Image (cartoon, coloured by chain):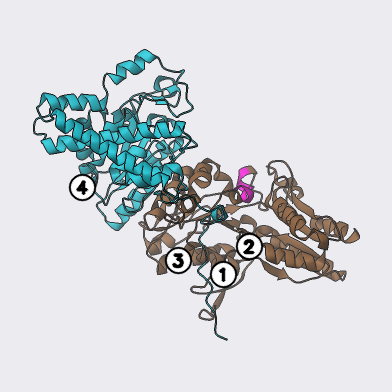
Amino acid sequence: MTPTDGLTREHGHELLLDMLRIRRMEERCAELYQKTKIRGFLHLYIGEEAVAVGAMRALTPDDAVVATYREHGHALIRGVSAEKIMAEMYGKQEGCSRGRGGSMHLYDAPTRFYGGNAIVGGGIPLAVGMALADKMQGRERVSACFFGDGAAAEGEFHESMNLAALWHLPVLFCCENNLYGMGTGIERAQSETRLALRAASYRMSAWDVDGMDVLAVEEATRRAAEAVRSGGGPHFLEFRTYRFRAHSMFDPELYRSKEEVAAWKERDPIELFRQRLRDAELLTDDEDAGLEALASDEVERAVAFAEAGTWEPVEDLERFVLSEPAPQREVAS
Amino acid sequence: MADAPDTRPMTLVQAVNDALDVALSQDPRVLLFGEDVGMGGVFRVSDGLQGKHGEARVFDTPLAEAGIVGYGIGLALAGMRPVAEIQFAGFLYPALDQVLSHLGRYRHRTRGRFTVPMVIRAPYGGGVHTPEQHADSPEAVLTQAPGVKVVIPSDPMRAKGLLLAAIEDPDPVFFLEAIKLYRSVKAEVPSGHYTLELGRARVARAGDAATLVTYGGMVEVCLKAAEVAAREGVELEVIDLETLAPFDAATVMASVEKTGRAVVVYEARKIGGFGAEVAARIAEETVWSLQAPVLRVAGWDAPYPPFSAIEHHYRPDARRVLEAVRKVLAA
């Protein structure tokens, strides 16, 4: 555990609030899924909140974020409004992807949030390409790419690690190692389960981080992001974390024991941090209740916004497949 | 083309090189990369471009096809105009995730907020004794990628104008270059900048007896067949699709309605090839004009043969096209 020395009350509250915002939103999404308000697939981030919350704090608005299909929390903390996220979950036009992305494809141009990617490892080369563009243009930006441990078995992971290191590109690889690629445990899928070690084999700085400790995540990401930003080439962080809920809403979780899940829940990132704030006398009961209320209110506003949203007309389905020609101008004869 | 009257004789390789040179010269966002592209490429398409435009804009990548396409998507999202080369169209298969899952979906998924203006060039097709994957014609797979345009030029002049249009297009474009045409013909090509409209088929030869619908490397085969037929007094109309996706049905239907007979010619495997789509569209849209069944002349339902001695059996030639023409004329 990183020490809480030097942690201000305000900073501590922000971190706790952000984790609560994700947790409460995700819990509400699960309910809405049961009520068939949200359809399709739904991959919840519950248990992993410390990673997105800690990591996003190290990024600036100019940086780019590429994420996975378990990206609701990343989008929220990156600054996409809960309203727009929830409307997108519903498939409403007012959503951040205008209703076409859904849970797995949240996109947002103003916050440079490049998705949302349903294909494991599919987003990694994109982040490398964006970093290449930044390097060519002399921009001091970081392209932060989130992906899971499962992606480390994909070819695109290795192609991207190799090129980013070879060309010294400003990419921050954020591996969220939650120990399972859907239902396959990491020891059954990876010849080397220490994923940071693998990244290091491409000659880039890489280390693992306690992903249940929001302060450790923030500190490590800040250090790595600053190094990337100042021309230090790609960096790789392996966040050791765990998802408390099933892979998706269809997953009966036959591949892991209740005891294992219970043991990890002992290290719930929210409860761990809450207790540390209390131990350091940085959080009172009233303050705690206040943060909870803020998180719950935000979710309820988001649900109301999504409920009030509108559906895309079916006639529009074939629109935006390709660019649309500008309206024909009359040509004077 | 009015502002570019000077022409020079060029092969298709030279015309593509010239188009890339023009694009790199006039738009600093244009980048050219792929396997061995910096040193000129397998077919020398990018010869001299690194020397002229620098290693920052014309560069080699590692052997990583999914990466090449994926990096390009990222570059395009970040405001560049990437032109990636896949060394052979048959080497594209490791990159199909990026092509089918990502490349063309950004616009639709975000209702136009994110776009990927990227060109992927690849040599395709047979006719020069390259075996197997080195002669593949996977264009039908690419037309199944939503949001991606597929362009296949049939001569040097059109290759240059279409490639410049593709690079300037706001959508991702696959640009396939028939290996057989790379050096087999020289034609006058305007110098400087000009573009030809994407999404339009053209009448490559006018006629009234039957319509040959084709594209890319098969256009010269069909034109040759039409010449032979003309000696017997049979005037065939040859439609060069140029852009497969989006498909210019109007030009094809207008021709078939006029002639009442259609033969579709392509060199990919017959089953599921793009010609199957063309034949289906003719049946759907203009069946009452037809005097004969729509026939297809295509590659065999087998991998492209590895031995040059039997290659000419696989790849359609004028003789096979004329056999099909005789059948539709006899019906």
Using a 10 Å C-alpha cutoff, classify the residue at mark 3 as few (fewer than 14 neighbours), some (14 to 19) or many (20 or more): many
Q: Say if the magenta span includes residue B142.
A: no
Amino acid type, residue under disc 4 in the picture: Ser
The mark nearer the N terminus, 1 or 2, is: 1
Using a 10 Å C-alpha cutoff, classify the residue at mark 2 as few (fewer than 14 neighbours), some (14 to 19) or many (20 or more): many
Task: Say whether mark 1 and mark 4 are on the same chain.
Answer: no
Q: Is residue B26 left or right of residue A2?
A: right
Which of discs 3 and 1 lies nearer the camera? The answer is: 1
Q: Label 4: which residue?
A: A230
Inter-mark Cα distance, 1 to 2: 10 Å
As drawn, the residue found furthest toward the right would be: B330
Inter-mark Cα distance, 3 to 1: 14 Å
Residue B23: which disc?
Answer: 3
Residue range of the region highlighted in magenta in the rendering: B133-141
Residues marked 1 and 2 touching at CB (< 8 Å): yes
Q: Label 1: which residue?
A: B196
Q: Position of residue A215 (x, y in %)?
A: 19, 32
Q: Colour of chain A?
A: cyan
